[in-house]
Image (cartoon, rainbow, N blue to C red):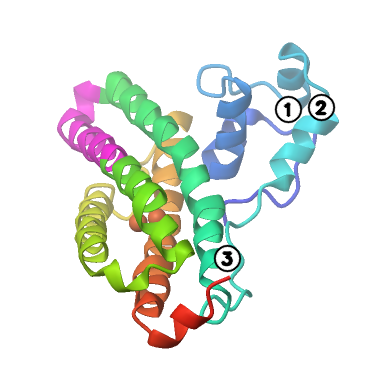
């Protein structure tokens, strides 16, 4: 849904960023402005940034769904699962959170006169979630995952309870975001930045639910299974 299927040199960057979160993310990363000068084609934007147009198109097409649903995480070694969570969810989220915060600030600044109350609440939730998730991932990576990787499974009760309650708080914040954004449906006539924010939040929502599902429903229950202590790498 969010990945551009085909992209050509003559596509305009504003409409592309509006309909594809992946494209907006690539443009943000490469410093290609698509809000006020979205009328440029991909070819023109690449030239102005001094980028090879083929490379820009390849980047736009390269991003694919995170994770690998075909992998059997119920059976893979625990240390492989923790490494997968870090690589597929933590690292991308660390890069994505500041981008979402910046987009939320920009949309609020540009539209506070007609939808300020809602956009301020969206910005506040995004800022708060970003801080909470960065803390949550740091705890997992510094404390919990190393314990799991070492096979110190009997001492995990308290840290896992703490992490689970943080996941619940994040889930409640996501639910508030979905209500506020009307399931990420951008209002009629929304600008490209607004659409990029709503689209980015929708993707963030999907990724975070997959991420927490892997931890809460697969990783944590497996650490309580006595047979796992014998199968640590
Ligand atoms: Fe987590
Ligand atoms: Fe995590």
Specify few, some or many for label 1: CA neighbours under 10 Å numbering under 14, 14-19, or 20 or more: many
129 sits to left or right of 69: left
User: Which callout, 2 or 1, points to the residue nearer the camera?
Assistant: 2
Say which element carries label 3: helix
User: Which callout, 2 or 3, points to the residue nearer the camera?
Assistant: 3
Q: Are marks 2 and 1 in contact (CB under 8 Å)?
A: yes
* Image location (x, y in percent) of residue 113: 20, 21
Specify the segment rendered in magenta: 112-131
215 sits to left or right of 165: right
Residue at horizontal 42 percent and vertical 58 percent from the top: 145
* Image location (x, y in percent) of residue 112: 22, 23
Q: Nearer the viewer, residue 10 or 129?
A: 129
Q: Nearer the viewer, residue 103 or 218?
A: 218
Residue at horizontal 22 percent and vertical 40 percent from the top: 125
Q: Disc 2 designates what residue?
A: 53
Magenta span contains residue 111: no
Task: Tell me where residue 134 sits by quadrant.
Answer: top left
């Amino acid at each position: 849904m969010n990945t551009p299927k085909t992209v050509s040199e003559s596509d305009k960057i504003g409409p592309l960023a509006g309909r594809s979160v992946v494209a907006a993310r690539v443009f943000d990363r490469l410093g290609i402005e698509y809000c006020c000068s979205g009328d440029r084609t991909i070819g023109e934007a690449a030239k102005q940034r001094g980028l090879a147009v083929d490379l820009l198109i390849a980047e736009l097409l390269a991003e694919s769904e995170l994770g690998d649903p075909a992998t059997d995480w119920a059976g893979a070694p625990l240390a492989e699962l923790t490494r997968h969570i870090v690589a597929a969810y933590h690292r991308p989220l660390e890069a994505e959170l500041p981008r979402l915060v910046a987009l939320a600030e920009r949309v609020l600044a540009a539209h506070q006169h007609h939808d300020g109350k809602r956009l301020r609440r969206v910005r506040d939730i995004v800022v708060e979630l970003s801080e909470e998730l960065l803390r949550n991932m740091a705890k997992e990576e510094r404390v919990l995952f190393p314990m799991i990787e070492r096979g110190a499974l009997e001492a995990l009760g308290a840290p896992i309870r703490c992490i689970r309650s943080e996941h619940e708080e994040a889930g409640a914040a996501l639910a508030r975001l979905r209500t506020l954004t009307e399931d990420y449906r951008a209002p009629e006539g929304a600008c490209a930045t607004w659409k990029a924010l709503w689209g980015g939040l929708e993707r963030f929502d999907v990724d975070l639910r997959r991420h927490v599902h892997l931890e809460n429903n697969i990783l944590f229950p497996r650490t309580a299974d006595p047979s796992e202590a014998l199968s640590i790498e």
